[in-house]
């Protein structure tokens, strides 16, 4: 503060009051993206104006070494205390994520099937079919989108659109969604799309033992199911 004093606030408490990180960020278990080649961040920097770089693959190591040799980076080995601080913050964030996952699930899972349907129906009845969720989604890549009126599936000029409009998009991405939250951020009527996709994706992940974004060489389950089941003869 201006008078030199400091005040601390508990992040979990602030977020319960609606402040802090975005909803999907609160649920995320991967605060240090070790599935990437390099993981960069401020945790473990001990208050210095530097970036902590964690090497997670041979390719990341090669990239970093070339950057150092080219003079783009100056590096120093972190202290044991810095590494421990980074791990501690990661553990704390992981525990917070599990807590938020439980809160988000419990809020809906305790409802009956009829109550769940009524809740989501009321949410999608607010939809103005602006296509913001589709356009913001990093994994919506079809050149010819089935949601366009000229495709004949979703009626033109109907607001709110049939719930089929939202269901088609959700089913299309549910097995590969990494819960980035862009769809929910883009929604002008604040439909909790990210939460719904997270809940559905969690069920699919449990069924197929797959978590989107963690294995770059693995196909999403609904992309790897054969057209016909193999038959033993």
Image (cartoon, rainbow, N blue to C red):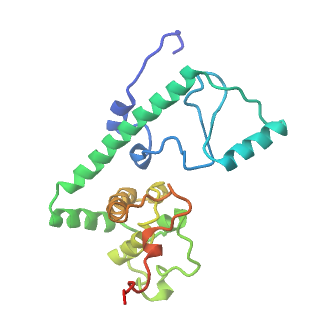
- What residue sits 71% from the left and 26% below the top? 76
Q: Position of residue 17 (x, y in %)?
A: 32, 36
Compared with 188, 162 (above or below) is below
Q: Position of residue 95 (x, y in %)?
A: 36, 37
Q: In this rendered view, identify the residue nearer to me: 116 or 129.
A: 116
**In this image, 202 relative to 106: left or right?**
right
- What residue sits 44% from the left and 60% below the top? 187
**In this image, 189 relative to 62: left or right?**
left
If the image is split into quadrants, where does the C terminus sit? bottom left
- What residue sits 54% from the left and 45% below the top? 33
Compared with 6, 214 (above or below) is below
Q: Residue furthest front?
A: 233
Q: Quadrant of the rendered structure where residue 155 is?
A: bottom left
Q: Quadrant of the rendered structure where residue 115 is?
A: bottom left
Q: In this rendered view, identify the residue nearer to me: 35 or 197.
A: 35
- Residue 140 visible? The answer is yes
Q: Position of residue 9 (x, y in %)?
A: 40, 24
Compared with 99, 47 (above or below) is above
Q: In this rendered view, identify the residue nearer to me: 136 or 76.
A: 76
Q: Number of labelled discs?
A: 0
**In this image, 26 relative to 59: left or right?**
left
Q: Position of residue 164 (x, y in %)?
A: 35, 77
- Residue 162 visible? The answer is no
- What residue sits 44% from the left and 41% below the top? 21
């Amino acid at each position: 503060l201006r008078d030199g004093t400091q005040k601390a606030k508990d992040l979990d408490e602030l977020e319960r009051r609606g402040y802090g990180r975005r909803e999907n960020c609160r649920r995320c278990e991967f605060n240090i993206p070790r599935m990437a080649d390099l993981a960069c961040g401020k945790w473990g920097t001990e208050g210095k104006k530097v970036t902590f770089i964690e090497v997670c693959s041979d390719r990341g190591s090669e990239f970093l070494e070339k950057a150092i040799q080219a003079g783009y980076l100056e590096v120093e080995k972190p202290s044991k205390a810095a590494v421990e601080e980074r791990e501690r913050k990661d553990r704390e964030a992981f525990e917070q994520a599990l807590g938020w996952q439980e809160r988000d699930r419990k809020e809906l899972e305790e409802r009956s099937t009829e109550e769940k349907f009524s809740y989501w129906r009321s949410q999608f009845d607010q939809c103005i079919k602006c296509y913001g969720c589709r356009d913001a989604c990093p994994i919506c890549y079809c050149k010819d989108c089935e949601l366009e009126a000229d495709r004949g599936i979703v009626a033109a000029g109907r607001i709110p659109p049939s719930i089929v409009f939202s269901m088609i998009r959700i089913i299309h991405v549910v097995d590969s969604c990494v819960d980035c939250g862009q769809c929910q951020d883009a929604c002008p009527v604040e439909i909790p799309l990210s939460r719904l996709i997270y809940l559905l994706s969690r069920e699919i992940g449990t069924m197929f033992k797959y978590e989107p974004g963690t294995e770059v060489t693995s196909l999403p389950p609904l992309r790897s199911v054969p057209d016909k089941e193999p038959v033993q003869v």
